Amino acid sequence: MGRSDLERLSKEELIELVLRLQRPPKTSRTSSKPPSTDRKEQRERSKPGGAKLGHEGHSRMISDTPDEVVEHRHDRCSCCSAVLMVDLPGEAISLHEQIDLPAVKPRVTQHRRLAVRCRACGARVVAPVPEAARRTPFGPRLHAVATYLKTFQALSYERLQAALADLFGLTLSQDGLMNLLRRAEVVASDETGVRIEGRECLPPGVPQPARRRASGRGHPRG
């Protein structure tokens, strides 16, 4: 409706037009229309789904170096039932890949110190303490995984204990996990206390003055 059309309207017609424009659109909330009509109108106004015209599709790349290749072929001809020998050349008509994680289980290396008797002089010679026995019994990979889950994924000690048990079959106490993280090279923590098997403890990496302040045993100020 143009300006000239509006000028030809009477006062009552203009008022009716303004009131009609101010009314909200009829929906199931503002009228007796069923809710199904709302969804139909929304579908009519909505844009079609899927990629836009001219969009270049992307798909997962097929691996050039698969760990295992399984070939599937018929052992008999579907037309004459003749036996199809396994040495017949085949043509790959499709490729399908299945990606999975390898089974992970703890690898335990046991170091045994041996004592032997010298045949020349009869002395009992004991092997020196290996370097592995001087450190924590947990290896660097376990340190890295525990630190990642505790620091970056913000797992509590209880959930970290459950995660290591569920994922790797490791049975570690929460005290053992705290000692493990205490010996890690990098530990991100503040002075907030944590609960270890029902006890209030300070996290590893908190300096000793902070531990004294948190426990209330700090020196009184002068």
Image (cartoon, rainbow, N blue to C red):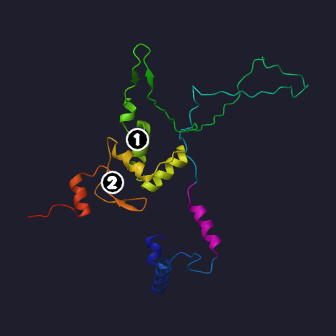
Q: Nearer the viewer, residue 150 or 101?
A: 150
Q: Would you name the residue on which mark 1 appears?
A: 143
Q: Quadrant of the C terminus?
A: bottom left
Q: What residue range appears in magenta?
A: 34-47
Query: Callout 2: helix, strand or loop?
Result: loop
Which residue of the protein is positioned furthest toward the left in this rendering? 222
Amino acid residing under circle 1: His
Q: Is residue 136 above or below residue 203?
A: above
- Residue 210 drawn in magenta: no
Query: Callout 1: helix, strand or loop?
Result: helix
Amino acid residing under circle 2: Pro
Q: Would you name the residue on which mark 2 appears?
A: 203
Residue 139 in the image: state x and y as whole percent: 42, 37
Q: How many marks?
A: 2
Residue 12 in the image: state x and y as whole percent: 48, 86
Which residue of the protein is positioned furthest toward the bottom in this rendering? 12
- Residue 37 drawn in magenta: yes
Where is residue 146, by image quadrant? top left
Disc 2 vs disc 1: Cβ atoms closer than 8 Å?
no
In this picture, residue 17 sits left or right of residue 103: left
Looking at the image, which residue is at 53% across and 43% down?
168
Dominant SS in magenta: helix
Residue 15 in the image: state x and y as whole percent: 46, 84
